[in-house]
Amino acid sequence: MNKLAVVALGGNALLRGNQRGTVEEQSQNTLDTLENLIFLVKEGYDVIIAHGNGPQVGNILMRNDAGEQLYNIPQMPLDIDVADSQGGIGYMIERNLRNVLKANGIEKDVVTLVTQVVVDKNDPAFADPIKRVGKIYSKEEADKLTAEKGWIFKEEVKADGGWRRVVPSPKPIRVMNEKVIENLARQGNIVITVGGGGVPVSEDENGNLCPVEAVIDKDLASALIGARVKADEFYILTDVSFVYKDFKGPNEEKLEFLNHADTMKYLEDGTFAEGSMAPKIRACLSFIENGGGKSVITEATKLEDKSYGTKITMEYDEKDVNHLA
C-alpha cells in the first residue's frame, strides 16, 4: 500500500500579503504551489490536500455586508460562507492540479469535497470568541450590528483602530465522510477536503446536524483527518522553511528535528507565538499523538528538499538526526 500524505496549504499558498486577491493572482499562486507538491505523487504517495480560506472568506463576508447595505440582499451565515469558499478554492486547486498532472504525464483523478466538520456545541471556545473575521467597523456601526444581529466585536489594535467581529474557533472532533475520503485517497485519487477547517456543524440531542457560527482552525482539522485516515505523514506548508526558537530575536535558533517531549516543552514555555506558529505546532502534535508517523512544517518551494523543514516525530529518528552529530 502506498504511503498517504496530508498536505495543508497555508493562506499564502493562494494569496500573498501584498496582493489584491484577484482570481488571476490566486490562480497563479495556486499553480506555483502545486508544482512544488507534485513530487509527492511522483514518489508514489497517495495525497489528501487541505487548504486555508482566511482572506477569501473575509472577502465573502464583506461582499455580504455591501450587498445588504446597498441592495438589501440578505446576508448569509458563516457556515454558508465557509462552504462557498470551499467550493471556489477547491475548484481553483483542482483545475490547476489537473493541469500540473497533465504537464507531468500523470493520470490521476482529483476530487473536491465540500466537507462538514463536527464541533462540540459546549466547546469552551463559544464562551470566548477570539477569531477576527470580516471588515473593520466604527464603534457606532459595531454597536448597531450587535443590537441587530447579536454579533460580538473586539477593538482592533492596529493604528487605524475600529472594531471587528469575533467568532468562536472550536476544536474539530469529527470529519464527515471520513471513510469516503480515505477510500478515495487509497484508490489513488487526490482528494481536496476540510477547506478552511471545514464547514462547522454541531449535533443536537437527536443527532441532527446544525449550522454553527464559527470557524475551525485549518491545521487542526487537517491533522484530524490525517489521523482518521491513518496517514503516514502530515505537511503544513507556510511561509518559512523552518520553525525557529526565539524567531527574529537575538538568540534565534533553527529547529530541524523535534521529538514529542521537546516540542511539548517548547510549547509550554511559550517559545511559539500564539498568533502564528503555536496552532501549527499543536496540529503537528495532534497528528503524531493519534498514530501519525511524522509531521513537517516547511515552505512550499522547499517541500521536495529534505534538508529543509522542521520534522516532528514521537521519538527522534536516528536516520534523520545522525548527520547533526
Image: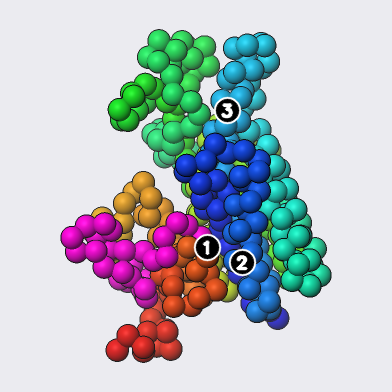
Between the C-alphas of marks 3 and 2, the distance is: 30 Å
Image coordinates of residue 58 in percent, x first then y, are 54, 33
Compared with residue 322, is residue 125 higher up or lower down, i.e. above or below? Answer: above
The magenta stretch spans which residues? Answer: 236-264
| Left-right relation of 301 to 100 | left
Whether tag 2 and tag 1 are in contact, CB under 8 A, the answer is yes
> Which comes sooner in the sequence, label 3 or label 2?
2
| Amino acid type, mark 3 | Leu
Quarter of the figure that contains the C terminus? bottom left
The residue carrying mark 1 is: 300
Cα distance between the residues tagged 3 and 1: 28 Å
Residue at (33%, 23%) from the top-left corner?
161
Q: Secondary structure at mark 2?
A: helix
Q: Are marks 3 and 2 in contact (CB under 8 Å)?
A: no
Up-down: is 37 above or below 318? above
In this figure, which residue is indicated by the disc labeled 2?
37
Mark 3 neighbour class, 10 Å CA radius: few under 14, some 14 to 19, many 20 or more: many
